[in-house]
Amino acid sequence: MPSVTSGWRLIGFAVALAVGCSQSGGAEKFVGTWTYAGSIDPNCMNIAAIDLTGDKVTITAPDSSHLVVDLAGFCTVHFNVDGFTASAAANQTCTFDIPMLGPEDITITKWTLTVTTDSVLASNFAGAVLICAPTGMGTLTRIGDAGAVDNDAGATD
């Protein structure tokens, strides 16, 4: 029969592991230069999808829990990182030239980036503009390194 002390150690280890796994961070997995493959479907008035395949995406990290994503000049979006998933912070927009409507600011209602391998991210986007509800799924493939996480951002010497 195991001792009570061994049981408490096992419980303590399990709790520590659970806490460690749920902490925010992991931005370094996302940092780099990527090529996007996919499109945004405006889901509006039978307007054709906007193909973003081949567009360059640059991801930098001001610290280990946050990302700044530049999507080919369409927008710069801030994300919060939790392990292998990054989620767009609230109240942000991207401007896309939507056929028949022209340039429109799409309010991001959900945008997640998920690490699938060291060199591939899955992207899942949803937004809102006028009477449309744009959505898009795609992948980002790493083409280069955009630098390291800046753990000294905002530090003064």
Image (spheres, helix red, strand yellow):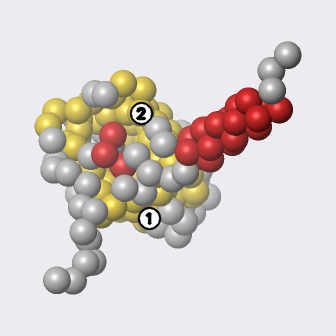
Question: Label 1 near label 2: C-beta < 8 Å?
Answer: no
Residue 18 visible to an observer of this rendering: no
Single out the mark in the foreground, 2 or 1.
Answer: 2
The picture places residue 128, in percent across and down from the top left corner, at: 57, 57
Image coordinates of residue 136 in percent, x first then y, are 48, 39
Locate residue 42 relative to residue 133 in the image: left or right.
left
Q: Is residue 43 above or below residue 79?
A: above
Return the residue found at the far bottom. Answer: 156
Residue at 40%, 59% (x, y): give it.
66
Q: In this view, does 129 lie to the left or right of 105?
A: right
Q: Which class describes the residues within 10 Å of circle 1: few (<14), some (14-19), or many (20+)?
A: some
Residue 71 position (above or below residue 9): below
Residue 139 vs residue 17, the one in the foreground: 17
The amino acid on which the numbered mark 2 sits, given as a three-letter code, is Val
Q: Is residue 21 left or right of residue 37?
A: right
* Image quadrant where one finds the C terminus: bottom left
Q: Where is residue 149 in the image (x, y as percent from the top left)?
A: 25, 55
| Mark nearer the N terminus (2 vs 1) | 1
Query: At numbered mark 1, what does the secondary structure look like: helix, strand or loop?
Result: strand
Which residue does the numbered mark 1 point to in the structure image? Answer: 93
Identify the mark at residue 115; answer none if there is no mark. 2
| Quarter of the N terminus within the rendering | top right
Q: Mark 1 is on which residue type?
A: Thr
* Residue 53 % position (x, y): 28, 33
- Quadrant position of residue 155: bottom left
Name the residue: 51% across, 53% down.
24
